[in-house]
């Protein structure tokens, strides 16, 4: 006898995603939509933990130019994230807050 015959319906076996996993998937998808330059700019500060001045040196550009790139890359990432269900709720993760004040 099949399980569906015993319980009266087909089994529903859908793995649930933790919201953190869902956010990670959405963030990865949003990053993939960005240009290589935008992705590199964001990852230098967010992943590598570099200050904008340090990231600018590593790219061989001025600190103000890097901060402008960072502001624009964050804006593009927010736009990409806002177009998703999960991403729309976590858009504050990539705020410009404070970076341009340095």
Image: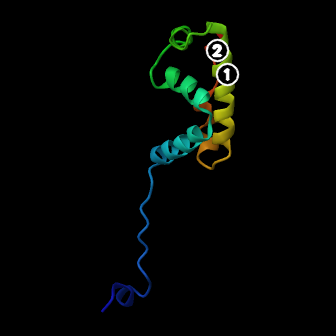
Q: Is residue 102 visible?
A: no
Q: Residue at x 55, y 8 (%)?
A: 53
Q: Position of residue 49 (x, y in %)?
A: 46, 19
- Gap in angstroms between the C-alphas marked 1 and 2: 6 Å
Q: Is label 2 in a helix, a strand or a loop? A: helix
Q: Residue at x 54, y 14 (%)?
A: 59
Q: Residue at x 41, y 62 (%)?
A: 15
- Front residue of 38/23: it is 38
Residue that badge 1 annotates: 71
Residue 87 position (above or below residue 35): below
Colouring convention used in this rendered image of the protein:
rainbow
Residue 23 position (above or below residue 76): below
Say which mark, if any, is on residue 22. none
Q: Is label 1 in a helix, a strand or a loop? A: helix
Residue that badge 2 annotates: 67
- Front residue of 85/8: it is 85
- Front residue of 81/90: it is 81
Q: Position of residue 24 (x, y in %)?
A: 49, 42
Residue 41 position (above or below residue 91): above
Q: Position of residue 72 (x, y in %)?
A: 69, 25
In the picture, which quadrant includes the N terminus? Answer: bottom left
Q: Position of residue 99 (x, y in %)?
A: 61, 15
The crowd level at tag 2 (other Cα within 10 Å; few <14, some 14-19, many 20+) is many
In contact (CB < 8 Å): disc 1 and disc 2: yes
Residue 74 placement: quadrant: top right
């Amino acid at each position: 006898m099949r399980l569906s015959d015993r319980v009266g319906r087909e089994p529903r076996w859908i793995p649930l995603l933790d919201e953190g996993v869902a956010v990670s998937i959405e963030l990865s998808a949003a990053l993939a939509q960005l240009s290589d330059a935008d992705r590199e700019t964001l990852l230098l500060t967010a992943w590598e933990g570099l200050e904008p001045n340090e990231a600018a040196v590593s790219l061989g550009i001025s600190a103000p130019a890097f901060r402008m790139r960072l502001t624009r890359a964050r804006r593009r990432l927010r736009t990409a994230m806002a177009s998703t269900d999960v991403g729309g709720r976590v858009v504050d993760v990539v705020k410009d807050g404070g970076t341009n004040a340095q």
